Image: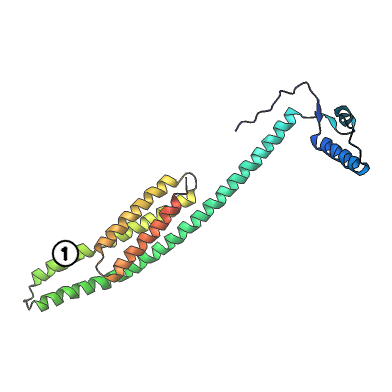
Amino acid sequence: CTLRFNEENAGKPLQVDRERAAQLVAAAETVASLIKQPAALNPLEVLAWPGVLVADASDPQALNSEAMQLFEQALQELKHGRNREGAELARLINERLDSMSEEVTTLRALVPQMLATQRQKVLDRFADMQAELDPQRLEQEMVMLAQKSDVAEELDRLSTHVTEVRRVLKSGGAAGRRLDFLMQELNREANTLGSKAFDTRSTQAAVNLKVLIEQMREQVQNIE
């Protein structure tokens, strides 16, 4: 920020109080209209009126000091404003993180039940085919099902990323790039989770997570 003083009038300590001169002329014209005579004021008479011609008391040092005080005040107000905005953004993001943690906890609790449901579907499929249950074949089917439907790793990584986002928010400073990277990681895990979803509950949970991540990503764009 640069502040420049116009010194072209240096050496001319007298200044005209324009407002006072205008008031004087207006008053003279009002009186002239009342007595129905033209105002006969000339410039010298206006200048001779007390308070119209004043000495320039401008002190460059004083102006500089005052300008710096105003600058510091504006800077502090800007900092306070950004701090308030940052705190509000952190609050909004933490709310979404809380919701994500709830979704992850719910999914963890549902996984055993969902796997059992899928196991029963495999058994029912064999029954519909009226095929003799080959224990080895059944075991292979169960292993493939478990591998395809195992979301424990994704849930663990989601929890880890949620914890890291909270840490970054608390650490302060320029966190925008780091948070943006974490949003990408969260979105990747949510996509993988969605691809492994095998019932309406897990599918809906994956959708909910992606919505929350997108909401956070929009907030992160406002963080440097």
Name the residue type under label 1. Answer: Met
Instruction: Classify 137 as above or below 36.
Output: below
The x, y position of residue 63, in whole percent, is 72, 32
User: Left or right: 222 with respect to 146?
Assistant: right
User: Left or right: 184 with respect to 112?
Assistant: right
Specify the quadrant of the image occupied by residue 206: bottom left
* Residue furthest front in the image: 36
The x, y position of residue 87, in whole percent, is 53, 53
Closer to us: 144 or 30: 30
- Taking the spot 61% from the left edge, 31% from the top edge, the residue there is 2
* Residue furthest top in the image: 11
Instruction: Classify 23 as above or below 96.
Output: above
User: Left or right: 208 with respect to 172?
Assistant: left
- Taking the spot 18% from the left edge, 66% from the top edge, the residue there is 145
Specify the quadrant of the image occupied by residue 71: top right
Closer to us: 83 or 112: 83
User: Left or right: 18 with respect to 196?
Assistant: right
- In terms of secondary structure, where does tag 1 sit? helix
- Location of the N terminus by quadrant is top right
- Taking the spot 73% from the left edge, 29% from the top edge, the residue there is 61
The x, y position of residue 14, in whole percent, is 82, 26
* Residue furthest right in the image: 35
Instruction: Classify 74 as above or below 7.
Output: below
- Taking the spot 85% from the left edge, 30% from the top edge, the residue there is 53
Instruction: Report which residue position mark 1 lands on.
Output: 144
The x, y position of residue 169, in whole percent, is 47, 51
Res 148 visible: yes
The colour style of the image is rainbow
Res 153 visible: no
Disc 1 packing (10 Å; few <14; some 14–19; many ≥20):
few
Closer to us: 166 or 4: 4
